[in-house]
Amino acid sequence: MTDADVIARLASHRTLGSAPVEQLGWLASRATLRRFAAGEIVSTRSAPVQRLIVVLSGHLCIRVDRGAGPRMAMEWRAGDVTGLLPYSRLSAPPGDTTAEEPTEILDVPGEHFPEMAARCHELTAILVHVMLDRTRRFTSSDLHDEKMLSLGRLAAGLAHELNNPASALARSAKELSAGLFEIEASTLALGLLRFSPEQLAAIRRVRELCDDHAARVALAPLERADHEEAVAGWLAGRGVNAEIAEGLSGTPLTVPQLEHLAGVLDDDAFEPVLRSICAGHRTRLLASEIEIAARRIHSLVAAVRGFTYMDQTKVPSPVDVGQGLADTMAVLGAKARAKTVTVSVRVAAGLPRVEGLGGELNQVWANLIDNAIDAAPSPGRVEVNAVRRGDSVMVQVVDDGPGVPPERLERIFEPFFTTKPPGQGTGLGLDIVRRLVRQHDGQIEVESRPGRTEFRVILPGTPVATSPKEVQGAEVPR
């Protein structure tokens, strides 16, 4: 193909066709025509980007595996331009570029860019606009992917956190149904007996003692074991049903209290009364467990609503950083416990609010804390502190992991660069964090050495202060 043929094809090119013909001629004289068969690799992820690629025909695409299998990140067809562009800082592609069908490209080495900027102003302007559009497309794609990954982490963490209270709720509700039948049966049995005022008072007193939670909590573990053994043994000696004896041995009732009850009741009334007391205690205990489980589920749902800001419009407003950190830990607490990592969150008193989008700031905290948990040993520790720094708010996320080597620390915010093993990191999290922090007029800093890696996010505060909070451990908030 002659230069004239190449110029003719460039003149009809969707992106470059509006450039002056003499500039297209300059480009054609410095380009190499290359052809690729379907499935052939045009460039690899490991190779630096050093050439401008003008797609004349066919279809190119980049597929990236960000933890959920390969997915097409970018594509180019006839009339598009990719590769190295003037003034671009792109150093390496996010993945291999592959020809999806027979493809023709013009390959222009980047070493010609200074001359192009000096001699081909219109052509350079077109390529700069292409670069800006590509940046926006990559940014949009990266944000979408990172938000989907965050959603996956949120769903996994929420499912884990909800599993225990939901299981307890279902189990207690099932047992409660059986307990209600037991109460009805024991009530009918007691209805056949006639009790004196003294006997009714003794029964009422034992019911109250049976539910004295403070008395049971006051016992040390060994004392509690001795207590249960003594009560169960005494009831067994009186011939009380084993199921009733087991149920009452776990209550604060003591042997002298049971002896007093036995002394004021007839022998044939003693076991029916104990059966009724045991059934009532068990039912109230189950109702309490249901209430606790339901309250836990409610608090988790509230934390997720706060974490995602799902019921608020995307308009900047004063954001409570402490509440955002607490909501974030509600999502990540299960992961920390699974790895035996203790996470402490401390928020200074009188901390100013931050003007911004709460959901995006929570994504910043989630990425930083999630990375810190990954980096920490097992067992390990992560400290999160929110303090005032002048008129700004500074959030510190510190882990006691092995640290990041200096040569890697310089690249830690680069897109697609990750210090995690293959398949475990996308290289997008910290890039997204930096973008979101900058969008909130803030800055992010990092220091690392063996045993301590610290990320600092500094955001401008507003006059409205927040109340002090202190959250200890990975199980919070409950």
Image (cartoon, rainbow, N blue to C red):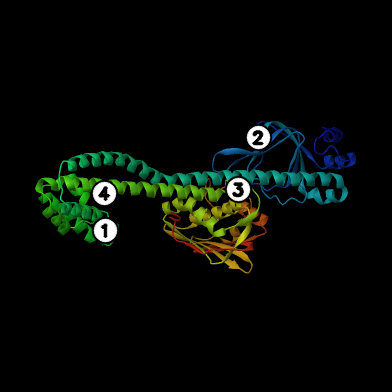
Residue 365 in the figure: left or right of residue 200: right
* Residue bearing mark 4: 281
Measured Cα–Cα span from mark 1 to mark 2: 73 Å
Q: Of callouts 4 and 1, which one flags the residue occurring earlier in the amino acid sequence?
A: 1
Between the C-alphas of marks 2 and 4, the distance is 74 Å
Chain-order first, disc 3 or disc 1: 1
Name the spot of residue 41 as percent of width and height, x first: 65, 37
Element under disc 4: helix
Name the quarter where the N terminus is drawn: top right
Alpha carbon distance from label 4 to label 1: 14 Å
Q: Which mark is residue 40?
A: 2
Viewer-nearest of labels 4 and 1?
A: 4
Query: Where residue 153 appears, x then y in whole percent?
Result: 51, 46
x%, y% of residue 398? Answer: 52, 62
Sequence-wise first label, 4 or 3 = 4
Question: What element does badge 3 sit on?
Answer: loop
Query: Is 267 or 386 nearer to us in this picture?
Result: 267
| Residue 379 in view (yes/no) | yes
Q: Secondary structure at mark 1?
A: helix
**Residue 312's mark?**
3
Q: How many angstroms separate mark 3 from mark 1 (CA)?
A: 46 Å
Q: Amino acid at mark 3?
A: Gln
Residue 216 is marked as 1
Q: Answer whether residue 45 is visible to the viewer in this image.
A: no
Does the CB distance between marks 3 and 1 fall below 8 Å? no
Q: Residue at x 55, y 39 (%)?
A: 69
Of badges 2 and 3, the one in the foreground is 3
Q: Position of residue 116 (x, y in %)?
A: 84, 48
User: Which secondary structure lies at badge 2?
Assistant: loop
The residue carrying pointer 4 sits among few (fewer than 14), some (14 to 19) or many (20 or more) residues within 10 Å by Cα, namely: many
Label 2 neighbour load within 10 Å: few <14, some 14-19, many 20+: some
- Whether the residues at callouts 4 and 1 have beta carbons within 8 Å, the answer is no
